[in-house]
Amino acid sequence: MTEHASDPVRETARLWAIRVNDPAFADWDALTGWLDADPGHLDAYEAALDDDAWAAELFATPPSPTEYAPAPAPAARQRRWMFTGAAAAAVLTALIAWPVLQRDLPEQVIVTAMGERRTIMLPDGSRVVMNGDTRIVLDEDAPRRIELVSGEALFDVRHDARRPFVVQAGDTRLVDAGTVFNVVEDEGALDVAVSEGAVIYEARSREIRLDAGQGLSRAGADAEPRLRRAAPESVGSWQAGQLLYDDASLDQVARDLGRNLGSPVRATPSAQAMRFSGTLTISGSPEQVLERAGPLLGVRFTRQEDVWVMAPSGEAGH
Amino acid sequence: MNRETQSNGLQRVILNERARLLRFLAARGAGDEAEDVLHDLWQRVATLPAQPISDPVSYLFRAAENLMRDRRRSHVSRERRQQDWHDVSVAGDDPPDGERVLIARQRLREAEAVLVSLGPRVDQVFRRYRLDGESQSAIARDLGMSLSSVEKDLQKAYRALAELRARMDAE
């Protein structure tokens, strides 16, 4: 990157990138006109998008070294800046060898509260975006294996055919084959959706390959897995403030809302039997989100202490 | 609304807006392949699950924008893979993964310092927009700012981060 960051075309391009990245942007013809006006505009626009992607990746790095960083890392890093040449190489070797030497490290449990999101960057460059109310276990001795104890996470995996990346959910293994995929685990109930690459589902000596655009749901630990379609752009859409459904039970919707809003949402038995296809926007306060969602879902939300109760809109509240 | 009528609905909008979409795709970097990308868009629209869409035209432009971003990303990562292979077979001194995370963490601290230096409001606007994914209008409403001030703050943040990036790349 040799051009000056304050070049006027780059400034304008940056503004376009900021506008277009807002979900409410609608002035596509003006964007077309600006791009058409000069062949240099497209390059500047791509550069602005690239800067945005760079910033996003940078801010996805866990800031605290307690978060799955090899514990001796800060000291090693300081030393690295002082040494050069062979000494630096020796320190690098120490860094590589480190995971092998520390065999008896405890597993690390990372938990998000309801409504909290957290991105975990793994040493191999893979990324785990945890939704609210989610618990995962990392084992530094096995950095390509993650246990999803409960909740929802989006996995963006650096594929390595020699070292497959495995997500363990109960007795089910999900093995990546080059992949972005989303997993929800809820007391044995499982939902997997693949947006890029493929995932192998392994449970009870059964293997099912899920390619991009496919998903699988299982109602409980012993239930039969059911294949479904998963529009790639809907996978992990909660990250962008949306929940997309295709014939989902409201029980499922209630759990998703709870995870995303930060306060539990419970469907009454009659609401649990209802189904929903469509999109819910989950930005704003829980009150705003539920107020918008109610008419779409055909339900009413009433607050009972710290729980939102979801009941069919025709039914009297409790 | 069942799936078929919904898809047909969006496909009808593609037919109606074909010229605008093609012009956008061509300007957006598809060039001569604009027709191919539009065809790709057409096919993707056919596999969408039924969902209410408030502004189908803008939705399709957004989808077209995303397709162009995907194309570029796969192009860049293909080039990077070739470059990686070249580096490994020639020099073999790509920093190991562990060190890459350390470098990223150091850079993150620098980027955070840059944002803080721009003042608490710019810092807050950038974080809410980029990290929490809030819309610009929501941020403007919440902080009692105009939409264009939010834009300007974001522009300031991105400019400073781009300068930081250029410095880091030069190191």
Image: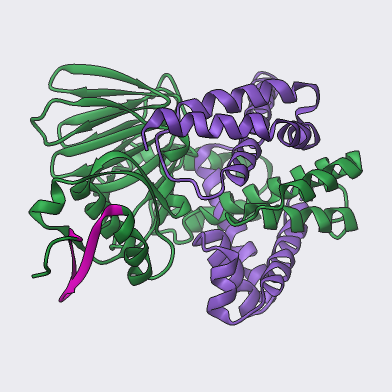
Q: Is residue A169 above or below residue B102?
A: above
- Residue at far bottom of view: B144
Q: Quadrant of residue A24?
A: bottom right
Colour chosen for chain A: green
Query: Residue B143: horizontal and vertical position, in percent?
Result: 57, 80
Relative side of B151 to B105, left or right: right
Q: Is residue A35 above or below residue B13?
A: below
Q: Quadrant of the C terminus of chain A?
A: bottom left
Residue A44 in sight here: yes
Q: How many marks?
A: 0
* Image point (66%, 28%), residue name: B80
Q: Is residue B132 above or below residue A216?
A: below
* Image point (35%, 33%), residue name: A193
Which segment is the magenta one? A297-313
Q: Is residue B100 above or below residue B82?
A: below
Please tell me whether residue A310 belongs to the stretch shown in magenta.
yes
Relative side of B49 to B35, left or right: left
Residue B84 in sight here: no
* Image point (80%, 27%), residue name: B31
Query: Residue B46: horizontal and vertical position, in percent?
Result: 49, 26
Please tell me whether residue A142 belongs to the stretch shown in magenta.
no
Query: Residue A90: horizontal and vertical position, in percent?
Result: 56, 40
Q: Quadrant of residue A300?
A: bottom left
Q: Judging from the image, what is the letter of the chain drawn in purple?
A: B
Relative side of A188 to A199, left or right: left
Viewer-closest of A242 and B109? A242
Query: Residue A84: horizontal and vertical position, in percent?
Result: 68, 46
Main SS category, magenta section? strand
